[in-house]
Amino acid sequence: MPIGYLDVPTGADLETKREFVKALYEAMHEAYPFPDDTRIFLHEWAPDSVSQNGLLGSEPFRPAFVAHVPQGVASDVKRTMMRQLNTAVAKAYQLPWFITFLHEHPLGLVAVDGVVLADDRQRVEDQQGAYSR
């Protein structure tokens, strides 16, 4: 269920993006192995479409990653994942000051195809087993 939204500058070639999203997927999947449904959406922005500290296009782009993830993963696992995410961004974009926000959601607040995940006992047990390592 991890879903990530990454805001980055335009300009990376397709092969760089392929390698980059693979590295992001691997980092997120290692932390959140169940279910295998990790989605990453790249938002690419032109420099004149980004303001930092009230100044339009005046600084090097500072990428941001927002991920919606299930609750229950240990803090050390999340720290490792965030270091791996940072490494992938640095390799692909050579940009400063990468920031990550994790939004953790209990299964009672997530639905897939209209079904609240907390209502699926097998899903709850499988996720608890996967995240209790």
Image (spheres, rainbow, N blue to C red):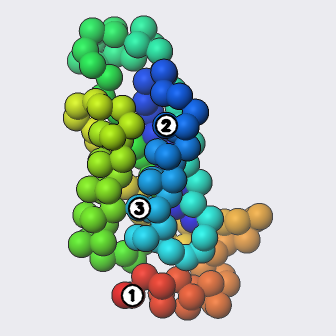
CA–CA distance between discs 2 and 1? 34 Å
Q: Give the labeled residue for mark 3.
A: 27
Q: Amino acid at mark 1?
A: Ser
| Closer to the eye: label 2 or 3 | 2
Residue neighbourhood size for the residue with mark 3, other residues' Cα within 10 Å, grouped as few (<14), some (14–19), many (≥20): many
Q: Amino acid at mark 3?
A: Ala
In which image quadrant can residue 58 be found? top left
Is residue 125 found left or right of 87 in the rendered image?
right
**Residue nearer the viewer, 37 or 118:** 37
Percent coordinates x, y for residue 14 in the rendering? 58, 33
Q: Secondary structure at mark 1?
A: loop
Is residue 19 shown to the viewer in this render?
yes
- Mark 2 or 1, nearer chain start: 2
In the rendering, which numbered label is found on residue 60? none
**Residue nearer the viewer, 91 or 74:** 91
Q: Amino acid at mark 2?
A: Thr
Up/down of 31 relative to 94, above or below: below
Q: Residue at x 62, y 84 (%)?
A: 123
Is residue 83 found left or right of 131 in the rendered image?
left
Percent coordinates x, y for residue 127 in the rendering? 53, 83
Q: Give the labeled residue for mark 2.
A: 16
CA–CA distance between discs 2 and 3? 17 Å
Q: Give the labeled residue for mark 1.
A: 132
Percent coordinates x, y for residue 114 in the rendering? 76, 65
Q: Secondary structure at mark 2?
A: helix
Q: Residue at x 29, y 31 (%)?
A: 94
CA–CA distance between discs 3 and 1? 17 Å
Up/down of 53 relative to 72, above or below: above
Q: Are marks 2 and 1 in contact (CB under 8 Å)?
A: no
Percent coordinates x, y for residue 118 in the rendering? 60, 79
- Mark 3 or 1, nearer chain start: 3
